[in-house]
Amino acid sequence: MYLDRAKKRLKDLEIVSPDELSGCTHYELNKLERQLGIFLPKAYQEFLLWMGHGGGQFLRGSDCFFKHLPYLYDWGTELLQENNFPEPLPEDAFIFFMHQGYQFSFFRLSEGDNPPIYSYCEGKNQTYFSKIHDKFSEFIETEIELHGKYLITPSSY
């Protein structure tokens, strides 16, 4: 639904084979929401059900899969403290992506089923969180395009 274009593009670029995609179960998703006391946006739920446990080479090296989710908020908060970032994370922020411990992305739980994405990156002298995408689905589509452009795909072996 929200990620139909992303799913088609990932398939068209042959970035991963279908057997490399490992989605979460509805049970795992519901358990995570109960554990954290939140309701996740529909577009993000779709991502977790699609590839919440892994996507082959896609997003490898980034902390964004199910096993990382309970820790990302704390890791992001630590990064902000280490860098004396002046702005606190919004109370309804959900960090869903961290790369190499120096940057992270989040959405606000109050901003709809396909929410805007905000980012922080160490070393950029930011004084506020940057809005990098208008929708979560755009974030995933952009990551697919970057992966397809810069990384080796299975068909190029």
Image: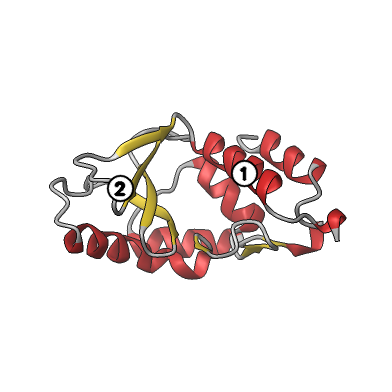
The residue indicated by pointer 2 is: 93
Q: In this rendered view, identify the residue nearer to me: 41 or 146.
A: 146
Q: Earlier in the sequence, mark 1 or mark 2?
A: 2
Q: In this rendered view, identify the residue nearer to me: 150 or 89.
A: 150
In the image, farthest residue toward the top: 134
- For label 1, the crowd category at 10 Å Cα-Cα, with few meaning under 14, some 14 to 19 and many 20 or more, is few
Residue 101 % position (x, y) = 38, 64
Q: Amino acid at mark 2?
A: Ala
Quadrant location, the N terminus:
top right
User: Of the numbered discs in the image, which one, if any, rests on residue 146?
Assistant: 1
Residue 49 % position (x, y) = 62, 54
Quadrant location, the C terminus:
bottom right
Residue mark closest to the camera, 1 vs 2? 1
| Residue 116 visible to the viewer | no
Give the answer, above or below, for where 100 lies relative to 131.
below
Give the answer, above or below, for where 76 lies relative to 128.
below
| Residue drawn at point x = 44 percent, y = 29 percent | 134
| Residue drawn at point x = 66 percent, y = 53 percent | 50
| Left or right, 109 with reference to 128 | right
| Residue drawn at point x = 62 percent, y = 62 percent | 25
- For label 2, the crowd category at 10 Å Cα-Cα, with few meaning under 14, some 14 to 19 and many 20 or more, is some
| Left or right, 62 with reference to 122 | right
Q: Amino acid at mark 1?
A: Leu
Residue 116 % position (x, y) = 41, 34
| Left or right, 90 with reference to 36 | left
| Residue drawn at point x = 46 percent, y = 42 percent | 41
Q: In this rendered view, identify the residue nearer to me: 12 or 100.
A: 100
Residue 15 % position (x, y) = 76, 52
| Left or right, 124 with reference to 81 | right
Give the answer, above or below, for where 152 lies relative to 139.
below
Secondary structure at numbered mark 2: strand
Res 79 → quadrant? bottom left
